[in-house]
Image (tube, rainbow, N blue to C red):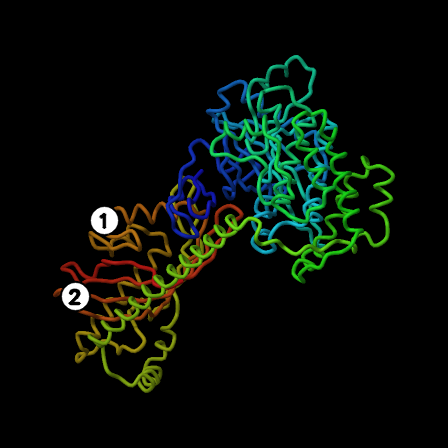
């Protein structure tokens, strides 16, 4: 299997270049494009510490899925292989709206393994925090609690199955928008979850002396390799809530050791230090979740969610605070999310909480806080600087592309004016020729090919579907008179170039690459790759078209031909339009572009010395 390093789309082994942007593809050895005859890899989503995640399609069900691939070198370790199998079994047990579903898993021929999961079309909580900070400042408590309550609901369901996540962080939380405007929050990656399984075969798989997790979100007992339980996840949830409210993690450092020591020894700074005006009750909830001693934390994720909702509801019922219109609109758009959270934890909440969330007007009594823009200027300054740099880079890129195209068009126009073919009245000339030669009225036709198919022996063959009008084959060109005793040298040269062009495109449409390449010179200035030998150009064309199940090509029948002199050589620029439609499996790709080939008159006839694309 190969994938494009620019757009990350996946292709078969025969596709040396991306079908979409012509970027060279990267070979992933021993990984098939279709797994188990069912899952076709479509696009690389992300790289992980132990493998990669791909977007794929279940071919029989025509359903999009996400596939996590574990590299074979990791599976050579029995402990890691068992951990991957345990992840699949553990995740398959979990059926909850706030947990990503697992559909299938298995082994690959190269010794690797795969895990088929629900594909989430959304954004991570990390991305949500960055976007919210840029647009609205710090996240409002109501919004933060609304998101985290759904996370708590999913984690509580995992805890009831004896599964501890142990790596909760904003990157492992996804937010998916629904059609009705509400949002669904899901927890990802139970890959380092600890099963409370009494099976002797499972003991010792997770080494208690091994630190597993992300330093900024790890619990103190994880730092020391102690036994963990549900309260370890509560600590990580507290770190996430702290970051959502203040825009910063409670413990950070220049290296991992410094962060772990702060988790073990240093109490967290009160969130109100970085967010003035934060309610004292909500601050106490955050600090309790971050207690060093697990016995002083909330006993479960459900209890943590209950206290968050109670505190936010109490704050909303107090004196309101004025807020900007933008924040108020953002709050109203997010209101369905709070209602979903309350339903998700209904099994765990007390009667008092039930009465609270079911009371009339609950979703209309949200406090609107103005965004505090002076709390953390450094992160936002860096963000705006990055946006400005990116915008400048885009402007420079578009300016360069526009200037390059303008220069190309100017050069062609200059060369055309320097060596005009013939000074004629196009309107009269055309109507005269249509009267004398009615067939010339159709010379603006096109050269079309139906589809290429593979023969039983594996070679590339094509249907004899190329349709070339007789006047095109005989070299008739709009604006050029038929051969006559008094025909000028320029007219004869144009007819010769047109004849070469016609057979060149017809051979490409037929898939006759031997004939097609016979029109090239020994060295060719080929697209953006510079000067290549004819053998390399032929190998590239065969490799690209050989990766298709079928293809359809369409070229302009009457191109623009402009004669010129270059260093003593007679040359001709041929500008034409082309369309294509290629098939590979169930995928079909269409496109069009304007091309330019330059032919030079050599001893053995006109030969192509340059092939470029000048416009899409």
Q: Nearer the viewer, residue 590 or 136?
A: 136
Snapshot quadrant of residue 606: bottom left
SS at mark 2 in the image: strand
Disc nearer the start of the sequence (2/1): 1
Q: Position of residue 79 (x, y in %)?
A: 54, 19
Q: Is residue 246 above or below residue 498?
A: above
Task: Work out which residue is located at the far top of the displayed protein and give it.
Answer: 200
| Placement of the N terminus among the 4 image quadrants | top left
Q: How many marks?
A: 2
SS at mark 1 in the image: strand
Q: Position of residue 95 (x, y in %)?
A: 72, 34
* Residue that appears at 70% across and 32% down: 94
Q: Nearer the viewer, residue 35 or 413?
A: 413
Q: Is residue 470 above or below residue 116?
A: below
How packed mark 2 is, by other alpha carbons closer than 10 Å (few <14, some 14-19, many 20 or more), is few
The answer, for residue 62, to whether it is visible in the render is no
Q: Nearer the viewer, residue 390 or 178?
A: 390
């Amino acid at each position: 299997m190969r994938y494009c390093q620019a757009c990350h789309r996946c292709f078969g082994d025969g596709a040396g270049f991306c079908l979409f942007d012509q970027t060279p593809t990267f070979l992933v050895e021993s990984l098939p494009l279709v797994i188990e005859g069912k899952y076709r890899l479509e696009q690389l989503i992300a790289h992980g510490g132990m493998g990669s995640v791909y977007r794929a399609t279940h071919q029989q069900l025509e359903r999009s899925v996400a596939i996590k691939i574990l590299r074979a070198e990791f599976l050579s370790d029995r402990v890691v292989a068992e951990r991957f199998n345990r992840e699949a079994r553990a995740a398959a047990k979990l059926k909850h709206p706030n947990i990503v579903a697992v559909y299938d898993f298995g082994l690959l021929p190269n010794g690797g393994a795969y895990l088929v999961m629900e594909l989430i079309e959304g954004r991570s909580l990390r991305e949500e925090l960055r976007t919210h900070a840029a647009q609205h400042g710090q996240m409002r408590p109501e919004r933060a609690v609304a998101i985290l309550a759904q996370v708590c609901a999913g984690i509580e369901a995992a805890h009831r199955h004896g599964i501890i996540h142990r790596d909760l962080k904003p990157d492992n939380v996804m937010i998916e928008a629904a059609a009705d405007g509400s949002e669904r929050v899901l927890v990802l990656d139970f890959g380092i979850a600890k099963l409370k399984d009494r099976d002797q075969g499972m003991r010792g798989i997770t080494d208690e002396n091994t630190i597993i997790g992300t330093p900024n979100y790890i619990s103190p007992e994880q730092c020391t390799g102690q036994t963990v339980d549900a309260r370890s996840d509560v600590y990580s949830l507290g770190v996430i809530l702290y970051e959502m409210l203040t825009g910063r993690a409670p413990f950070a450092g220049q290296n991992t050791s410094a962060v772990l020591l702060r988790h073990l020894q240093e109490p967290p700074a009160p969130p109100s230090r970085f967010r003035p005006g934060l309610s004292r009750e909500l601050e106490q909830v955050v600090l309790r979740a971050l207690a060093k001693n697990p016995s002083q934390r909330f006993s479960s994720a459900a209890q943590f969610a209950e206290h968050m909702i109670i505190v936010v509801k109490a704050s909303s019922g107090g004196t309101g605070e004025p807020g900007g219109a933008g924040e108020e609109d953002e709050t109203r758009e997010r209101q369905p999310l709070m209602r979903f959270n309350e339903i998700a934890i209904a099994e765990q909440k007390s009667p008092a909480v039930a009465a609270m969330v079911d009371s009339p007007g609950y979703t209309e009594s949200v406090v609107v806080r103005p965004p505090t823009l002076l709390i953390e200027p450094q992160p936002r300054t860096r963000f705006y600087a990055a946006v400005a740099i990116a915008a400048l880079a885009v402007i420079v890129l578009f300016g360069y592309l526009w200037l390059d195209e303008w220069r190309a068009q100017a050069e062609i126009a200059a060369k055309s004016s320097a060596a005009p073919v013939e000074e004629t009245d196009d309107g009269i000339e055309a109507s005269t020729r249509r009267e004398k030669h009615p067939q010339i009225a159709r010379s603006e036709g096109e050269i079309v090919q139906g589809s290429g198919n593979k023969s039983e022996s594996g070679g590339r063959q094509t249907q004899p579907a190329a349709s070339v009008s007789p006047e095109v084959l005989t070299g008739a060109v709009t604006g050029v008179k038929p051969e006559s005793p008094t025909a000028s040298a320029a007219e004869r040269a144009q007819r010769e170039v047109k004849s070469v062009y016609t057979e060149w495109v017809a051979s490409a449409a037929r898939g006759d690459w031997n004939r097609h390449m016979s029109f090239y010179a020994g060295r060719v200035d080929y697209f953006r790759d510079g000067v290549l030998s004819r053998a390399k150009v032929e190998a590239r064309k065969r490799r690209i078209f050989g990766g298709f199940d079928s293809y359809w090509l369409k070229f302009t029948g009457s191109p623009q031909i402009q004669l010129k002199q270059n260093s003593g050589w007679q040359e001709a620029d041929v500008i034409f339009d082309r369309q294509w439609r290629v098939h590979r499996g169930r995928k079909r790709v269409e496109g069009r572009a304007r091309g330019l080939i330059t032919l030079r008159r050599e001893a053995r006839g006109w030969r192509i010395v340059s092939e470029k694309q000048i416009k899409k």
